[in-house]
Amino acid sequence: MHGEMFRAAYVARAEEAVTEFWRRRRSARSDPQFTVSKVVCTFHEPLKLGDLVETHVGVSKIGGKSAGFLVHMERDGTAVAEAEIVWTACDPESREPIALPEDLRDWLYQFLD
């Protein structure tokens, strides 16, 4: 690997960034549980151990039952990777997909890229 980070580390960092993004929002009783239904990562430049990476999270899509997030990762202003992560809203007991609550959709729309 020539000192390069494992590709799974990019995905882990992207998931951490999406989790931090959600911390901006106060939880509501009507919030569903979520499950990750899709992860796609495009790699541009290799990272090495110790590299500092900046992330930017935007909302890439808002569906009836899911929301997509696009995570841009940069090192010193240069794009190193982009990850698309889709979260699907689920009923906490049945784990079946359910509609996104309107207040949650409204909140997400302000971050739509």
Image (spheres, helix red, strand yellow):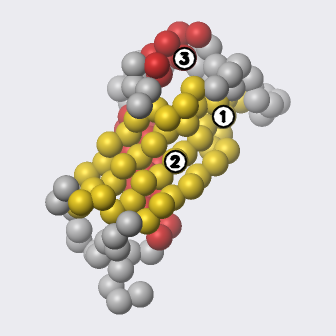
| The C terminus sits in image quarter | top left
Look at mark 2 in the image and give the residue it sits on: 84
- Is residue 100 visible in the rendered structure shown here? yes
Q: Pointer 1: residues within 10 angstroms few (<14), some, or many (20+)?
A: many
**Residue at 24 percent of width and 60 percent of height:** 78
Q: Earlier in the sequence, mark 3 or mark 1?
A: 1
**Residue at 46 percent of width and 32 percent of height:** 59
Identify which amino acid the numbered label 3 is placed on.
Arg
5 or 27, which lies in front?
A: 5
SS assignment at label 1: strand
Identify which amino acid the numbered label 1 is placed on.
Thr
Q: Is residue 86 above or below residue 43?
A: above
Look at mark 1 in the image and give the residue it sits on: 88
**Residue at 23 percent of width and 71 percent of height:** 50
Q: Quadrant of residue 112?
A: top left
69 or 93, which lies in front?
A: 69
Judge from the rendering whether residue 71 lies leftward or rightward of residue 85; answer left or right: left
Q: How far from the left and from the top, in percent, is residue 47? A: 31, 71
Q: How far from the left and from the top, in percent, is residue 105? A: 54, 17
CA separation in Å, label 3 and label 2: 18 Å
Look at mark 3 in the image and give the residue it sits on: 105
CA separation in Å, label 3 and label 1: 13 Å
CA separation in Å, label 1 and label 2: 13 Å
- Is residue 28 visible in the rendered structure shown here? no
Q: Is residue 7 above or below residue 31?
A: below
Q: How far from the left and from the top, in percent, is residue 53? A: 26, 58
Query: Which residue is most to the bottom?
Result: 2
SS assignment at label 2: strand
Q: Quadrant of residue 49?
A: bottom left
Q: Which mark is residue 18?
A: none
Identify which amino acid the numbered label 2 is placed on.
Glu
